[in-house]
Each structure stands twice: as structure tokens, then as C-alpha cells.
Image (cartoon, rainbow, N blue to C red):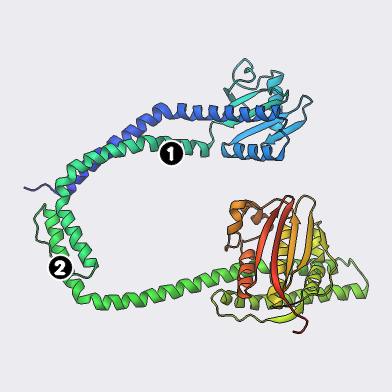
Amino acid sequence: MKISIRVQIALVTLTLLIGTLFSCWFLNNMFLERYYESEKYKNVQTAYDKLNQAGIDEALDSEEFQESMLEYAYRYSMNIQVVDVNQRLVFAATLNRKELQDKLMQYIFRLPFWEQGETPEPDKIFKIRDIRNNTEYIEMYGQLDSDQWYIISTAMQDVRDSVKLSNRFLAYIGVWAILLGGVVVWLLTTRIVKPIWKLADISERMTHLDFEAKYEGKGVKEISMLGENINKLSESLERNISDLKTANNELQKDIERKEQNEEMRKEFLANVSHELKTPIALIQGYAEGLKESIHDDTESRDYYCEVIIDEAEKMNTMVKKLLTLNQLEFGNDVVSMERFDIVTLIRNYLQSANILIKQSDIQVRMQEEEPIYVWADEFKTEEVFMNYFTNAVNHCSGERIIDIRFEKQEERVRVTVFNTGEQIPQESIEHIWEKFYKVDKARTREYGGNGVGLSIVKAIMDSMNQRYGVENYSNGVCFWFELEVVKDNQ
């Protein structure tokens, strides 16, 4: 009686699985904790070496060192703090500066807050359990060679680090176990899989619509049954392949149309939510001003009402234009090239956004410039500038300055929007124009962004065949776009 292939493969697989899992489990329980702890010790020692060398080089307060040290501390889930002999903060990589500094003082003045009765020695790595929160830490404290006091602390219960180290360790052992098991499986299944290879060859020929191939071999009973069923399937496919291909083609077209419509719908909703935020903020601000009677004179109230009406009209126009913009990416929208003054357009926009500027406590600088007439789609150009400007407001920090300039060239003018603040990481620059890409997700959520503003800029500028881009500066970021200047005789 033939032994079922199911039984043979099950026995081999079960044996291999049990052996592999038992080995991994045994080794994990025996060595993982020590391996994990030794990695923590190495990380703490490396952090100390970096701090000490920076103290010797008098670079503890340098921007380059602090950025590097913050990145290292974040990567390995460490809390680091350095203070001078007067307890003034020199460097910190922690969210709980006060708590960490108190712990350092307790170490220095030997105030027991741990289970051990004796104070750990300075400049040595030790493991303690903090009885205040029942958490085990690996820590190191003491004085650097440059006399500053330091403390380095990392929790043993760090989930991220624990999973990473566990996976790495299990990978090392798992590879050898899989290789050994693979050899065993290969040796035991060689005799079994030969008929399967024949069936695989037949199935491959069937993928090329060669239905003449038939299985005629002998093997275990399951394979023989499979061969007979493949022969029947071949005959059935040959009869129905034409109808199946026709139905499949129609179905594929329907799926593609549905996916395209769904994608357009999602992009439209994202664009609407992004682009309506600023006009709504302006309307809300001026409406609140009317309600609170900030200005009682008729002229001021009329001005507030005019701004609200104007922004409402802009929102109405914007919704219609977003539909056009959505079609623009599919090549179904026509750009309306007009002659207009780009300087006046931007000045008018800044005037309408004045309340937003004041609320953000930002200083906006715009050079005095004579009219510059360009050829472009006026509404889409304003939309490009609006995206650049609101992006600058949301990311402005430091001196909180936004500088707008016009750089005239032979046949073009470059409009630049610069804001002080943090630079865009170099690896992110080529991706910021992609839909929904966010450099800093937490900050983007904070100001309500959705990562589509710059993708709108890209679609508009591409539709007008004009250049655009971004440059990092030492004290901020500059976005720019170019337009064709109207010649004197045009």
C-alpha cells in the first residue's frame, strides 16, 4: 500500500518545525537576556565616549554634536543629560529633564532611591531598579574629563529595542536551523517530488495555452489523482478559454475604471480639505471681529464684511478649480494663460491674509517692486503662492521671518518665498512633491496639514510648463517658481 504524500510531508515538516522552534525557544531563554543587556552596556559606553570626547574638544554646545547626539539617543532609547558644576544645563536628550537632573543630584549626594543599599560608583555602568516606578534601568553617571556632570539612562523594558534585538538574535539561530532543516527536507522529499515536477511542467505548458500536454506518469495515489484532474481541467479550459478571456478583459476594464474614479475622489477630497483651511480661517477671524465689535465705525465693519464675502467667493471658486486641477493631472483641463501683474497679485493676497499673519506672530517682508506682468493662469498662480505661503507660515520658527522676493531674468521672473526655521532633510527633498508625503508627520498633524499642498503646486506648474523648486539655507528654507515675463511688444 502506498504511503500518502500528505503523511510523508506532514511528518517531515512537523519534525523540522518542532526541532526548529524548540531550538529557538531554548536558545532564546538561555542567552537573549544576556545578549540584550550586553548591547545596552555597549550603547551606554559609546554614549559616554561621545560625550567625553566632545567635552575634551569643547564641542558639547555645538549644533552638529547636539544633533548627532540627539539622533543617537533617540535611536537607542536613551535619556542623556549634562550639567556644569553650577548645575546649569549643557545638553539634554530627554523629555523629563527635571526628573533626570534630580536623579543625577541624588547620585552625586548619595541619596538612596533604589533597592541597593550603597550608591553606585561614578563612571561605571550599573543596573538598578527604581523603586519609585518599579522600572529597571542601565545607567552611568559621573564627571567628564572636562568637569561637567553627566547621567546616561536607558530602560531595560524598552519594547522597541527588545523586539529588535530579539528578532536579530532569533534570525541568527533561525538561519542555521532552516539551513539544516532544508538539507533534511531536500534529502527526504527528492523521491516524492519527481512526479510533481512533471505536473509542474504540464501546468507551465498550460499557461502558454498548450492543452495537448497530458499526465501519464505513476506515483503516490494523491499525485495520480491530481494528474487525472489536471487532464480533465486541460480539456475544460480548452473549451472555455475564449469566453473566459473575453469576460476577463471586460472585468479588468471595469476594475481599472473603478480604481481610477476612487483615486480621483480621494485626491479631490484631500485637496478640498487642504485648500479651504486658510479661507475659512480668514472668514472666521473677520467674523469674530464683527461679533466682538473690535471696530465700531461703519467703514471698518464694511471692510470686514467685504473680506468675508471675498473669501467666501474664493472658496466657491476654489472648489470649482480643484475639480479642474484634478482633471489637469489626467490631461483633461485647459490652462487659461492670462496677462497680469504678479506683484499686485501677491500684495493683494498678503493683505487678505493679514489677520493670519498677525495671529502667527510672523514678520513678512516683501521688497518694493514695480509691476511685473507675466503670462500664466492667474488663479492657479495665486494657488501656487498660497500653498508656498501657508507652508512657510506653518514651518516658520527661529526669527519668524518670511521674505518674499522677485528675481527678474531675461525672459522670466523667479518668485521666492523664504522662511526662517529648520531645513528639509536632504533625503526628503525629492519626495516632498509627492501626494500625501510628510517630512514631519507629528508637526503636520499639529497644524492640520494633509501633505497635498506641494503636489498641487507640482500639478499646476507642470501644466504651465514652468520651473519650480526648493533650496535649503543655513537659517531656513526657500521655495520658488518661475513665470514667463510679458515682453514690451506683447
Contact (Cβ within 8 Å) of mark 1 with mark 2: no
Q: Residue furthest right?
A: 297
Q: CA distance from mark 1 to mark 2?
A: 47 Å
Q: Residue furthest bottom?
A: 489
Between 465 and 444, the residue placed more toward the observer is 465
Callout 2: helix, strand or loop?
helix
In the figure, is residue 299 to the left or right of 82? right
- The answer to whether residue 385 is seen in the rendering is yes
Where residue 66 appears, as percent x and y from the top left, is: 68, 38
Q: Mark 1 sits on what residue?
A: 167
Residue in the image at 19% along x and 41% along y: 187
In the figure, is residue 318 to the left or right of 253? right
Q: Mark 1 or mark 2, which has the lower sequence index?
A: 1
Image quarter of residue 81: top right
Residue in the image at 81% along x and 74% along y: 344
Q: Residue furthest front?
A: 410
Question: How many numbered marks, from 0 up?
Answer: 2
Residue 483 higher or lower than 164, as above or below: below
Callout 1: helix, strand or loop?
helix
Between 413 and 87, the residue placed more toward the observer is 413
For disc 1, the neighbor class at 10 Å (few under 14, some 14 to 19, many from 20) is: few
Where residue 24 appears, as percent x and y from the top left, is: 35, 34
Q: Mark 2 sits on what residue?
A: 232
Where residue 421 appears, as percent x and y from the top left, is: 73, 52
